[in-house]
Image (tube, rainbow, N blue to C red):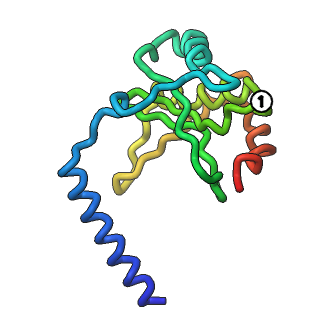
Amino acid sequence: MHFGRFREDRRMARTKKTKTKRKLAHPKLPMQGQLNLCHEGTHFDLRSMFDDLNERYFRGRLRSYKVMWGRRRKHRPREYFIFGTIQEEDRVIRINPALDQPFVPLWFLRYVLYHEMLHSVIPDETLSEGRRRVHTEEFSRREREFPSYRRARRWEEENLSRFLR
C-alpha cells in the first residue's frame, strides 16, 4: 500500500510539472475565442431563457454574459452530474447538453440557469488555507427565492439517476 501511494505521489508530481510547463508554453486564451457559442438546443433555447431570467431577477445586469450548451460527453458519468457551470473570467455559462431532452421540464432548466446566474452576483467567501465557499448563506437564501426552487430540487433528486451510468 505504501509503495502504491509513493508511485501515485511521483505521478502527481510529474503531472504538476507538466501542467506548469504547458501553462508557460501555452498561455490560456480567452475562452470565448475558442468556443462555439451555441445556445439553441433541440428542445430548448438557452438565450431566450437567459434573457427572461436576467430581466426578471437580475434587472438586466448580466448583459455581457454568453450562455451555451456544453460539449456532449462520450460516456455518462458514474457518480455525479454537473448540470451547469459558470466561467466568470470569460463570462460564459455552460449548461450540460444532457438537459436538452423532452423529459426535462422547462422550469427545472430555468432553475439550473438561474443558479449559475446567481454565481455572477453573489461573491464567494474566502476560507482558511486559500479555500473558498461558492454556495454561501446569501447564495442559498437567494436561490430559495426562485419560484420553482423546491420543486426543482425534488425533481433533481428523483431524476439524477437518469443522467448517470
For residue 57, say whether it is visible: no
Q: Secondary structure at mark 1?
A: loop
| Residue 17: percent from left, percent from top | 25, 65
Instruction: Please rate how many residues cluster around mark 1, counting C-alpha atoms within 10 Å: few if below 14, some from 14 to 19, many from 20.
Output: few
Residue type, label 1: Pro
Mark 1 lies on residue = 102
Q: State which quarter of the image contains the C terminus.
A: bottom right
Going 61% across and 36% down the picture, which residue do you hit? 97
Going 43% across and 82% down the picture, which residue do you hit? 5
| Residue 15: percent from left, percent from top | 32, 66
> In the displayed structure, would residue 31 be above or below residue 82?
above
For residue 159, say whether it is visible: yes
> In the displayed structure, would residue 47 be above or below residue 157?
above
Going 70% across and 52% down the picture, which residue do you hit? 164
| Residue 81: percent from left, percent from top | 63, 48
67 or 86, which lies in front? 67
In screen coordinates, is 139 left or right of 162?
A: left
